[in-house]
Image: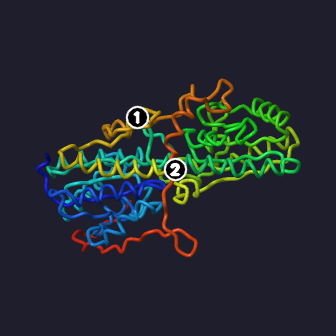
Amino acid sequence: MSKVKGNCLVAQSGGPTAVINASACGVIQQAWKSELIQGVYGAYNGILGVLKEELFDIGAEDPDTVEMLKITPSAALGSCRHKLKKLEDSRADYERVLEVFKAHDIRYFFYAGGNDSMDTAAKIKDLSAQLGWEMIVMGVPKTVDNDLAFTDHCPGYGSVAKFIAASAMEAGRDTESLSTFDTCAVMETMGRNAGWIAAAAALARRYEEDAPHLVYVPEVSFSRQRFVEDVKRVHSEFGRCFIAASEGMRWDDGSYVAEDKSVMAKDSFGHSQLGGVAQVLKKIIEDELGLKTRWMMQGLTQRNAMHFASRTDRDEAWLCGAEAVRQAVSGTSGYMVSLERVSSSPYEVKTGLARLEDVANGEKKLPRQWMNEEGNFPTAEFLDYARPLIEGEVKVPMAGGLPMFMRFERKWLPGKCKEYQVG
């Protein structure tokens, strides 16, 4: 049992998901049960909120509002893509974080996010130890990309997989009905370096003629000639072709199929902005085969579709948040909660722990053996892995025919530190 007593702070970072709020709900509700945690606070917009000392009292919120986090998509606490630099290059920022923590007696810090968030959490843990501030830091996994290492899967992935598969089923029927006119269709999904999301489209295929017919992921290098041959073969068999393609597809030389080379097209982490691979594939099909082709991008809807979220995903997201608190009050620090698969049939998982530093430096890609030899469709092994993750539906309350989501009132904590210029 931990002997640390004080307040806790929960924050969210990176791209939102349909269930990251369920993780926050798990943290909050479990923290309210602990005698060691006296106040439960939220950081507005992740680590930026800490640097700016923009913190609010979650304890002042209606418990029913907190419960509704389970059915509200995106990041209700506010998120950011602000990445703290290396400790030696940006010590002032880390010391500012500790200054804010000390001012508000933050003894427990829970950060929900991906690799970069786990890296930030690890560095905060190290610096707090160096400066003699007794504090427990725990990571909560989050990413639709499903690319965090040391966990079987990531909260957020099951819901995006469910949405993408359903989208492929529906759009595929559209292509089928108009195949005499709109012969081919390309559906672009998220996924910079890992093809988990695009691969999930394969869950839609119950019959041979069902969409998608072809799936392309970053883990298999893309060849224009092979692609043309694939589409030609499928079209000759079904009279149409529906393709699911990851935004991160790469040519044989390793360059992205659809990368904006302009200097401005960079995110805050220095990653090139992707998007447009569907248009590239459309042009290849029309230029090489003369087949009329439509394209579609799911955009932000794929990662925030609470109306079609996976209940399994939602429940596991809550579990990860609650487990982070259970581990923290028992004295565990410097770890991210992981999910370990016990069985796929019947489906069963248990929680585990992974060192923050290990998660920060790892990346889990779709195994090459989970794509067929031709590299254009997932194997049965992948489908067995993914199917349990999309099971169940989340019941979302409705008003006026549309979903009801929560909003925090945000009772701000009085500032105690000097104003700080965030670089």
The local secondary structure at tag 2 comes to helix
Amino acid on which disc 1 is placed: Arg
Would residue 341 be found to the left or right of residue 167 on screen? left
Q: For label 1, count other residues whose C-alpha is less than 10 Å away and answer few (under 14), some (14-19) or many (20+).
A: some
The residue at the point 58 percent across, 72 percent down is 401
In the image, residue 29 sits, relative to residue 177, either above or below, namely below
321 above or below 147? below
Please rate how many residues cluster around mark 2, counting C-alpha atoms within 10 Å: few if below 14, some from 14 to 19, many from 20.
many
Q: Amino acid at mark 2?
A: Ser
- Residue found at the far left of this picture: 3
Residue at x 42% of width, y 55% of height: 20
Percent position of residue 150, x then y = 39, 35
* Residue appearing at x 51%, y 59% in the figure: 306
Query: Mark 1 highlights which residue?
Result: 341
Cα gap from disc 2 to disc 1, whole angstroms = 18 Å
Q: Picture quarter containing residue 118? A: top left
- Residue 182: where, in percent of width, then height? 84, 50
Q: Is residue 317 left or right of residue 396?
A: left
Which is more toward the observer, 197 or 105?
197
Please tell me whether residue 133 is drawn above or below residue 403 in the rendered image. Answer: above
Q: Which residue is labeled 2 in the image?
A: 159
Q: Quadrant of the C terminus?
A: bottom left
Left or right, 327 with respect to 244, comes to left
Which x, y percent locates residue 368? 57, 27
Give the tally of numbered discs.
2
Q: Residue furthest front?
A: 346
Q: Is residue 75 left or right of residue 322?
A: right
Check contact, mark 2 vs mark 1: CB within 8 A. no
170 and 46: which is toward the camera: 170
Residue 246 spot, x, y in % from top left: 63, 42
Badge 1 element = strand
